[in-house]
Image (spheres, rainbow, N blue to C red):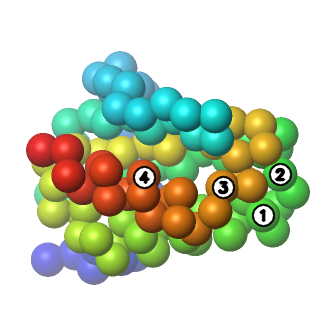
Amino acid sequence: MVDVAKYISKFSPKEVKHFFDNAKAFKKCSKFTCLLSPKQGEFARILIITPRASGNSPERNLVKRRLRALFYQYKLYEKPYDCAVILKPHGCDASYAALKNLIVKIGQCT
């Protein structure tokens, strides 16, 4: 089996295109949008899109690290769908609790 933690957020350009062709909106709020699509590989992955308008690079990287860690912690890689989180402008202001709440809601969706 592949080491899931290493590849939990790795997508090729072809896989990204396939993801967005099949994606459905799951949750929208003022800080981010979440999309779900059927998984393409042997485990589910998370795609995190952080535009420059959402904050400076340390803030964007912090949000990405938190989302990847929560995705792994709640074992969402075992779910039947890939997930994309798109931050909106000033989305880096989202608290850890808000990100955790999003991941928990994704985990409850089957």
Q: Which residue is mark 4?
A: 102
Q: Secondary structure at mark 2?
A: loop
Percent x, y of residue 70: 41, 70
Determine whether label 2 and label 4 are within 8 Å by CB.
no
Percent x, y of residue 66: 55, 70
Determine whether label 3 and label 1 are within 8 Å by CB.
no
How far separated are the C-alphas under marks 1 and 4? 18 Å
Rate crowding at label 3 as few (under 14), some (14 to 19) or many (20 or more) other CA atoms within 10 Å: some
Q: Look at the picture and state if 97 lies above or below 39.
A: below
Percent x, y of residue 58: 81, 68
Q: Residue at x 58, y 68 (%)?
A: 96
Q: Which residue is mark 3?
A: 94
Of the two numbered discs 2 and 4 in the rendering, the one whose residue sits closer to the viewer: 4
Q: Amino acid at mark 3?
A: Ala
How far separated are the C-alphas under marks 3 and 1? 10 Å
Of the two numbered discs 1 and 4 in the rendering, the one whose residue sits closer to the viewer: 4
Dot 3 or dot 4: first in sequence order is: 3
Of the two numbered discs 3 and 1 in the rendering, the one whose residue sits closer to the viewer: 3
Q: Look at the picture and state if 20 lies above or below 6.
A: above
Of the two numbered discs 2 and 3 in the rendering, the one whose residue sits closer to the viewer: 3
